[in-house]
Amino acid sequence: MDVFEGLAEKALRGEAPTRQEALAVLASGDDDLLELVAAAYRVRRHFFGKRVKLNFLVNLKSGLCPEDCSYCSQRIGSKADILKYTWLGPEAALAAAEAGVAHGAKRVCLVGSGRGPTDGDVDRVGRTIAAFKEKHPQVEICACFGLLSDGQAERIRDAGADAYSHNLNTSGERYADICTTHTYADRAATVEKAKKAGLSPCSGLIAGMGETDEDLVDAAFALRELGSESVPVNFLIPFDGTPLSDQWSLTPQRCLRILAMVRFVHPDVEVRVAGGREIHLRSLQPLGLYLANSLFLGDYLTSEGQDGGVDLRMIEDAGFEVEGAEEATLPKHRNDTVRPRKRGAGTDLAANA
């Protein structure tokens, strides 16, 4: 459709669509989907070529969270069947991260559940960050430990972190519907603290929580205004035992329209197709690479992702290449049923071979 090409031309000039244009992308029909993907791919290709940046997540602390975020399996009162453990030490964290680095990950995300870190927690994770950077100075570290107090972002930066991740998740208007123990403003303030400290701000959204098109568009534009340099687009994993366990409204086509809208709003920043892609995009996952230039390799916080070898083959088969890796080791293909399952502290991709 001509309207999609018009959006691509604007994005190539670095201009954002209007709010009405972004809403029109989400409201477009399935018959127009390939035209939409092709137009958004022009933007992705212009700024990022055929590169795919791989990210690998290490869950340093699982469960035990006092916050009541409705989408989260680690929330207070959650009955989801997940592993619960307190902080991993540097050796265990490094061991968990090695598989991702060995398979081409250029960013390792160190995550810890909870409202926010204590100063002692910052010291602890600082030692982990420093140990990792000593061994892998070329690999980015993105920290994600919740709401930050004054001065903590600077200490995380000084330990060697490159980025800090804290998602807005949804629109400001809807936020109180999914969480009551902290506010949308609290989240935005943490992103600002990270940014002020010189950490690259990583902040994104979660789709599939019962939000409206307006909520998704509001969140995308808020992230642009906030200056997020990495925008993860998550698709809700409806864990049993959480308030949103019955939210199964997403289709593969809907997910692609959301990714296209985010690409038009954020033409020249990293857009990462993140949690839930395997469940909701299903066989259309490769089309997501034409919109997003980044993805998580392997597992997420409390659920298994797609086998790492399958991800690498998908990238290769679609004609893309792993960013910064001369070659990626492709483990033997393993067929697996994709569904939310509990996982351990880390995944050894090599063991999947």
Image (cartoon, grey):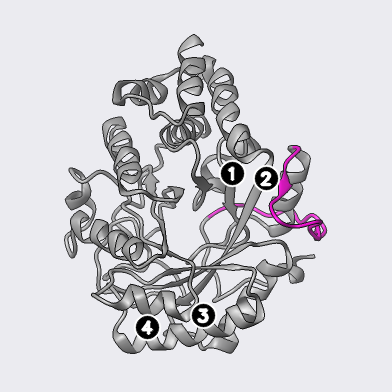
Mark earlier in primary sequence (4, 1): 4
* Residue 1, image x, y percentages: 51, 11
Residue holding disc 4: 122
Residue 244 versus residue 38: which sits nearer the camera?
38
Using the image as rendered, state which of residue 7 and residue 112 is in the foreground.
7
Q: Is residue 344 visible?
A: yes
Residue appearing at x 51%, y 42% in the figure: 280
The Cα–Cα distance between marks 2 and 3, rounded to whole angstroms, is 26 Å
What residue is drawn where x is 50% and y is 76%?
160
Tell which of 200 and 276 is nearer to you. Answer: 200
Q: Main secondary structure of the magenta part?
A: loop
What is the span of residues highlighted in magenta in the rendered image? 319-339
The residue that disc 3 covers is 129
Asked if the stretch drawn in magenta spans residue 336, the answer is: yes
**Which quadrant of the figure contains the C terminus?**
bottom right
Q: Please, what secondary structure does the residue beneath circle 3 have?
A: helix
